[in-house]
Amino acid sequence: MQAIRCILVVIDPNQPQELALKRARLISSVSQSHLHLLICDTRHDHSAHLSALREQLESEGHQTTTQQAWHESVHQTIISVQQAEGCGLVVKQHVPDNPLKRALLTPEDWKLLRYCPCPVLMVKTDKPWTGGNILAAVDVGNADLEHRTLHTTIVNHGFEIANLADGNLHVISAHPSAMLSAADPAFQLKETIEARYRDACKQFQEDFAIPNERLHVVEGPADALIPRVCHQLNAVVTIIGTVARTGFSGALMGNTAEVVLDTLESDVLVLKPDDIIDHLEDLVRH
């Protein structure tokens, strides 16, 4: 977060609380990031609103630019501007879709999480981050290099946010249920599965000084456990990775980040592996 030079803040004139702008202000005050405010619309002129926001932010010491644009859809507009401005983070207020509409059409926020080539912070609440619990969700059951790198990135972002907000970092990893038929004896007992997962967490526990009581290795599906632990901790931010699955596979299975987006009672920061970011940037360019 400290290295972000420009933050794209999506302004929704229909959401007068401007929660996304409040979060972006907090991050910018520490990282000294430039704020680029965007309204996705062509039907109405929002120049006066954007000018007022820019004047207010500049009076507080923030470097700010503004833009109103439209490129076919909300998520395409955001991504086009993110690439053009070189923004390292997108901050947007999340408003849940009607369940019936979501069943028929992929929500715009889901598309943004899938296709945006940079981290996305979905702001859901006005709870102050200061002194709060930060929850980083990792899947240490996937031990390949790509996932290990993503795990480190997730925990690192959690560590930075905890320092930014003077809060406490917690880490969760869901593990599968024991199966007597498993070929590996380690997966035949719950205790040995949990021990293996805890061993996989030791490196980043040491790197980021995470005590055992803040490491939550829990049995069950991640999409159910992450919101439950988030609720128990009253977390203010949950950091989660996504593989940006698209196409029929994405429609059928979904990504954990998408599935938990509406059920989490905290803001949600979504990260991707570097190779997927490179691929998405290529798609945007072409």
Image (spheres, helix red, strand yellow):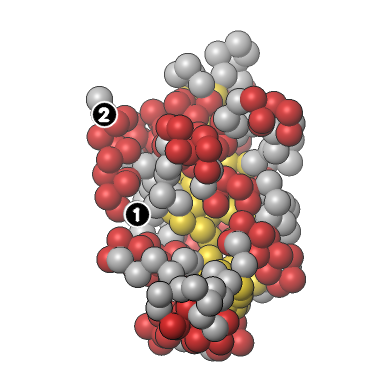
Examine the rendered structure and indicate whether residue 171 appears above or below residue 35.
below
Above or below 7: residue 199: below
Q: How crowded is mark 2: few (under 14 residues within 10 Å), some or many (20 or more)?
A: few
Question: In whole angstroms, how far apart are the C-alphas of marks 2 and 1?
Answer: 19 Å
Q: Residue 231 at what x, y percent from top left?
A: 74, 65
What's under tag 2, amino acid-wise? Answer: Arg
SS label for mark 1: loop
Residue that mark 1 sits on: 273
In depth, the one of 42 and 275 nearer the eye is: 275
In terms of sequence position, does the residue under pointer 2 or pointer 1 come before the other?
1
Judge by depth and name the residue closer to the eye, 173 or 235: 173
Residue type highlighted by circle 1: Pro
Can you see residue 116? Answer: yes
| Quadrant housing the C terminus | top left
Which of the numbered marks, if any, corresponds to residue 285?
A: 2
Badge 1: few (under 14), some or many (20 or more) residues near its Cα, within 10 Å? many
Residue lying at the far top of the rendered structure:
43
Q: Position of residue 120 (x, y in %)?
A: 49, 47
Q: Residue shown at 60%/11% (left/top)?
A: 43
In the rendered view, does 184 fall on the left or right side of 129?
left
| Residue 84 pos. (x, y %) | 33, 31
